[in-house]
Image: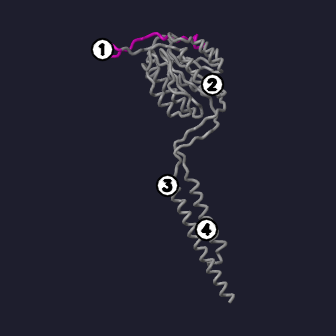
């Protein structure tokens, strides 16, 4: 009688294990199918604290920036080298201001450097009235930093001339920057003496030698007033070296919110499937081992 009851107990264990095994394997299979489908969340925001500073690049796009002492010209050289600078500082919030006869914000401070680079590539001479409103360009850049909570706030001001228009004198804009703890690095772009400038004639585009008229005294004064530094870029290599020097600026912690269009969600399902299969393996080789022999 005892042998018969033991036999029934073994059959019951076998039957129960087969039942639970089917359930566990079904759960594992379902989880693996979901994991292989790579579920993703459509929208997500992620707060993070990162090392960096807030930087506004204020660049001159006046007609004289088409001079060809930098290659292919001052404007394009400045764009290309600034884009490399942006790509080398992924943790910084960077924005873009352009100025000529007046100024405007091409891109506000952003951590999305792909958008910033695309907007940088889109700038060209003729977007706004010609002239050189250095004071307006600097004032607009400083205004973009007024709400910044970063410990380090920087403007990189690049121009090839002297202030010829605008309602705000450059030194006044520099004083405003100083009060707002914005450090300004000024860059004078252009060779010394004369530079080739393309001029449309009845015989096509001709190069004429035009004088380089960078107001170094004013640019130096702006930098000194705000605790920055003045640089002179007479060719592409020197302009690149200037950006590399600015790249070594001090860093400060700033909070950023990163926007992700897609976030992978497959990992929890893959881990669940692994856990279920492991659980079945453990049961098979421990609790139900004697029942299956």
Q: Please state, as top left, top right, bottom left or bottom right, where the C terminus lies in the image.
A: bottom right
Q: CA distance from mark 2 to mark 1?
A: 49 Å
Task: Residue 82 in the image: state x and y as whole percent.
Answer: 52, 26
The residue furthest left is 202
Dot 4 crowding, Cα within 10 Å, few <14, some 14–19, many 20+: some
Q: Magenta segment: does it hold 267?
A: no
Task: Residue 148 in the image: state x and y as whole percent.
Answer: 62, 27
Task: Residue 145 in the image: state x and y as whole percent.
Answer: 60, 24
Q: Which residue is mark 4?
A: 280
Q: CA distance from mark 2 to mark 3?
A: 45 Å
Marks 3 & 4, CB-CB < 8 Å contact: no
User: Residue 7, relative to residue 194: is it above or below?
Assistant: below
Q: Label 1's element?
A: loop
Marks 4 & 2, CB-CB < 8 Å contact: no
Q: CA distance from mark 4 to mark 1?
A: 86 Å
Numbered badge on residue 37? 3
Q: Magenta segment: does it hold 201?
A: yes
Q: Label 2's element?
A: strand
Q: CA distance from mark 3 to mark 1?
A: 64 Å
Q: Which residue is mark 2?
A: 153
Q: Label 3's element?
A: loop
Q: Is residue 212 visible?
A: yes
Could you tell me which residue is drawn at 51 percent across and 59 percent down? 33
Numbered badge on residue 203? 1
Could you tell me which residue is drawn at 59 percent across and 59 percent down? 272
First in residue order: circle 3 vs circle 1: 3
Q: CA distance from mark 4 to mark 2?
A: 59 Å
Dot 2 crowding, Cα within 10 Å, few <14, some 14–19, many 20+: many
Dot 1 crowding, Cα within 10 Å, few <14, some 14–19, many 20+: few
The answer to which of 218 and 149 lies nearer the viewer is 149
Could you tell me which residue is drawn at 52 percent across and 49 percent down? 40
Q: Which residues are magenta?
A: 200-220
């Amino acid at each position: 009688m005892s042998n018969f009851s033991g036999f029934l107990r073994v059959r019951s264990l076998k039957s129960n294990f087969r039942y639970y095994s089917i359930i566990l394997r079904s759960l594992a299979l379902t989880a693996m199918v979901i994991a292989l489908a790579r579920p993703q969340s459509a929208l997500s925001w992620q707060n993070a604290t990162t090392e960096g500073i807030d930087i506004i690049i204020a660049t001159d796009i006046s007609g004289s920036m088409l001079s060809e002492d930098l290659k292919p010209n001052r404007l394009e050289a400045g764009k290309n080298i600034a884009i490399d600078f942006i790509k080398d500082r992924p943790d910084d919030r960077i924005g873009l201001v352009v100025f000529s006869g007046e100024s405007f914000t091409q891109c506000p401070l952003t951590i999305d450097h792909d958008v910033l680079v695309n907007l940088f590539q889109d700038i060209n001479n003729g977007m706004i009235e010609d002239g050189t409103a250095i004071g307006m360009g600097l004032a607009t850049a400083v205004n973009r930093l007024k709400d910044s909570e970063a410990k380090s706030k920087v403007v990189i001001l690049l121009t090839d001339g002297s202030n010829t228009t605008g309602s705000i004198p450059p030194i006044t804009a520099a004083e405003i920057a100083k009060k707002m703890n914005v450090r300004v690095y000024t860059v004078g772009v252009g060779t010394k003496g004369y530079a080739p400038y393309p001029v449309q004639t009845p015989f096509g585009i001709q190069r004429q030698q035009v004088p380089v008229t960078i107001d170094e005294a004013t640019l130096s004064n702006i930098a000194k007033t705000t605790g920055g530094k003045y640089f002179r870029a007479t060719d592409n290599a020197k302009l690149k070296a200037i950006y590399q020097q600015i790249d070594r600026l001090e860093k400060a912690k700033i909070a950023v919110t990163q926007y992700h269009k897609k976030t992978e969600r497959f990992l929890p399902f893959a881990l669940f499937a692994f856990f279920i299969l492991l659980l079945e393996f453990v049961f098979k080789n421990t609790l139900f081992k004697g029942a299956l022999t």
